[in-house]
Image (spheres, helix red, strand yellow):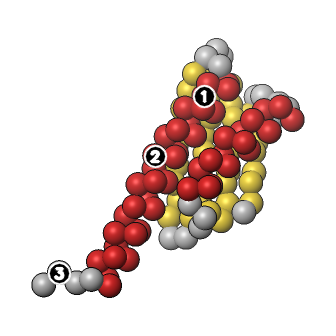
Amino acid sequence: MNLNITGHHVEVTPAIHDYATGKLDRVIRHFDHVTSVHVILSVEKLRQKAEITLHVKGKDIYADATNDDLYAAIDAVVDKLDRQVLRHKERITEHARDKHHPVE
């Protein structure tokens, strides 16, 4: 898996990098087919924004969140992304199950 963390108008310190990586481990643990992750952390006046694009086979999953605190924004965006990944995984397994057991 390829992980890319960039900052716009903010320096990505080792602490922020480790925090974001640790939070993303939870999402990746739920779904093994992640090929790459791109995280963009930005600051616009007093708003801190975190955006994550997760590349999986056949789809890109995107989530973003803003907050006054960058760590809280990372928490919020990872929660959103986790829900989307679980929903995507559920759809894939339902689709595969429907192939093997056709409805009569």
Hey, what amino acid is under mark 3?
Val
- Which sits earlier in the primary sequence, circle 1 or circle 2? 1
Name the residue carrying label 2.
83
Q: Which residue lies furthest to the left in this view?
A: 104
Q: Which residue is drawn at 67% across and 60% down?
A: 36
Name the residue carrying label 3.
103
Distance of mark 3 from mark 2, alpha carbons? 28 Å
Q: Please identify the quarter of the rendering in which residue 22 is found.
A: top right
Would residue 22 be seen by someone viewing this image from the given angle?
Answer: yes
| Mark 1 surroundings: few (<14), some (14-19) or many (≥20) residues within 10 A | many
| Mark 3 surroundings: few (<14), some (14-19) or many (≥20) residues within 10 A | few
Hey, what amino acid is under mark 1?
Ala
| Mark 2 surroundings: few (<14), some (14-19) or many (≥20) residues within 10 A | few
Q: Please state which of residues 21 and 58 is positioned toward the viewer in this rendering.
A: 21
Q: Residue at x 59, y 67 (%)?
A: 33
Q: Residue at x 72, y 63 (%)?
A: 1
Distance of mark 1 from mark 2, alpha carbons? 16 Å
Q: Residue at x 67, y 41 (%)?
A: 23
Q: Please identify the quarter of the rendering in which residue 32 is found.
A: bottom right
Would residue 44 be seen by someone viewing this image from the given angle?
Answer: no
52 is higher (above) or lower (below) than 73: below
Q: Quadrant of the C terminus?
A: bottom left
Q: What is the number of the mark on residue 33?
A: none
Q: SS for tag 2?
A: helix
Distance of mark 3 from mark 1, alpha carbons? 44 Å
Hey, what amino acid is under mark 2?
Arg
* Label 1 vs label 2, nearer the camera: 2
Image location (x, y in percent) of residue 60: 53, 59
- Which sits earlier in the primary sequence, circle 3 or circle 1? 1
Name the residue carrying label 1.
73
On the picture, is 33 further left or further right than 22?
A: left
Q: SS for tag 1?
A: helix
